[in-house]
Amino acid sequence: MAFQDNLRGSLLMVGAMGAFALEDMFLKSAASELPVGQILILFGAGGMAIFLLLSLRRGERLFHPGIASRALIVRSICEVVGRLCFTLAIVLTPLSSASAILQATPLVVTVGAVVFFGERVGWRRWLAILIGFAGVTLILRPGLSGFEPASLFAVAGTLGFAGRDLATRAAPPGMSNLQLGTYGFAMLIVAGAIALSYTGGAKLPSGAAWASLGAATLIGVLAYNALTGAMRVGDVSVVAPFRYTRLVFALFLGITVFGERPDIWMLVGSAIVIGSGTFTMLRSKPRT
């Protein structure tokens, strides 16, 4: 049964990462016109509205008692920190550098799973995760030429996202993914408000910007729901490494949408990422 749960969680994580890559593509389009803070506010409001309507339609209460639990409070704080700090990292540092640091999230999550949930991770899985991270550095090696002080925002963002995923695992079982999605997107509004209060520059979006935000919201809802489901099924240490596949999807979109031409090192790195994640999942299958 554990293997089936891990397989389901891994597939949900892969689906979530593919959807997040599409979300990034549409948000990047909107960012050419609107400030990041405004994008987070509109994106968060749209996603929260969708999750809220779906939750109410199923007869779920808006304010679940578990909203005041320690896990949900920690999750909300980590959501704000992750979204806000990583957005600042993207603005202040090269995207490749910020993204490279973000790929350490599975490592942080795995360590957290061992510390907080008592999951057992053998040396082979540790090695597979480290090899997967090496594959990420091959893909993003242009961003590894130096470390900028502002990159600490990316480090804080990585810790925030890892904390959010771990807190999702510890969320009260009675809370649905729809309720968690509602609260999660609400935190994007908070993060956006904080950013916009410093940058200003809000304006009425054009039709193209609204279309990009709408597409990003719909896809983001699917991605967030899949991510939440993935972190609540199977072993965190098995599911988390499949976050690496986000880079593979981003690479594909770069080729097909933006006409990028990856070199051999990017292709090798992508193969390593896929191989390490698959090995990690297969190692969780009980022997008979």
Image (spheres, rainbow, N blue to C red):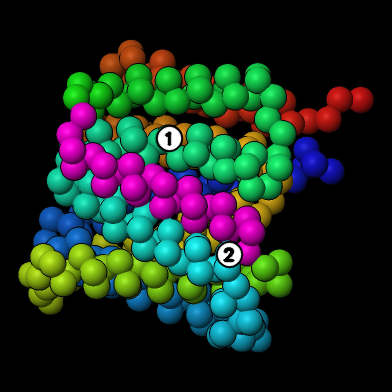
- The label shown at residue 177 is none
Give the image location of residue 286, x and y in percent.
83, 30
The answer to whether residue 57 is seen in the rendering is: no
Q: Is residue 5 above or below residue 222?
A: above
Task: Name the residue: 80% across, 41% down.
Answer: 2
Tell me the SS state at disc 2. helix
Residue under label 1, please give it.
Answer: 104
Label 1: how many Cα within 10 Å (few below 14, some 14–19, many 20+): many
**Which amino acid, mark 2?**
Ala
Percent x, y of residue 258: 22, 38
Q: Identify the residue at horizontal 64%, vertical 48% (top origin).
A: 116
Q: Residue at x 78, y 38 (%)?
A: 3
Q: Could you say whether the residue bearing mark 1 is in a helix, strand or loop? A: loop
Instruction: Tell me which secondary structure the magenta stretch mostly adopts.
Output: helix
- Mark yes or no: residue 44 visible: yes
- Extent of the magenta region: 147-171
Q: Nearer the viewer, residue 193 or 142?
A: 193
Residue 169: say if magenta.
Answer: yes
Question: Relative to 225, is 65 on the left or the right?
Answer: right
